[in-house]
Image (cartoon, grey):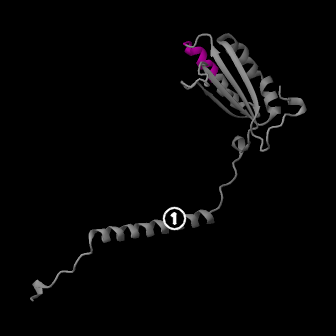
Amino acid sequence: MSASEAPRPIAPPRRARVAATALSFAATALSLATAALCLAACSTPAPAPTGPAAVQPRVAHVVIVWLKDPSDVAAREALVRATLGFESIDGVVDVQVGGPIPSEREIVDDTFDLYILVMLRDRDALDAYLAHPDHVRAGRELLAPAAARVLVYDSDVGSQEPYRPDATHAAP
């Protein structure tokens, strides 16, 4: 047999090559996952947030509005602008404004026009917010003239303990 006629090595069957490739891939993935876990375990935790983000809100003030004229874009935008401005009031942690999500479910009331969520530091912050001149002015000059109906819900939401009404805020 000449050198040019030397037997060629026999390649492993395709299944064996695929299995070897998969095993190699799994080993590489396991190594990378282990390295990532080690890095995560050894890393320095992120510093605690400061400022308004560090305050865990305890009170949710929810306002649901049905407008007299839902097509009055100017009135709606004025309400939204004023509401978003409430974030500058001391004790307000977050302000969100939205509208309904149309739903076929009978339990869902999607007939309102505007949803307002104001998250506050605590009950004292809620009391101060309600009396704040910007809030009072927006209610008198923007909300009252534009709203056909308003529902308001205030709730203690940030407590780590189960809800128990106290003597000053007893459940109905």
Q: Which residues are magenta?
A: 71-80
Q: Position of residue 59 (x, y in %)?
A: 76, 34
What residue is disc 1 on?
A: 33
Looking at the figure, which quarter contains the C terminus?
top right
Q: Position of residue 53 (x, y in %)?
A: 69, 42
* Label 1 crowd bin: few (<14), some (14–19), many (20+), radius 10 Å: few
Q: Residue furthest bottom?
A: 1
148 or 144, which lies in front? 148
86 or 146, which lies in front? 146
Q: Residue at (79%, 36%) from the top-left corner?
A: 122
Q: Residue at (30%, 68%) from the top-left corner?
A: 15
Residue 61, picture quadrant: top right
Q: Residue at (65%, 18%) from the top-left corner?
A: 65
Give the left or right position of residue 1, taking residue 143 as reference.
left
Mark 1 residue type = Ala
State whether the magenta stretch is mostly helix, strand or loop.
helix
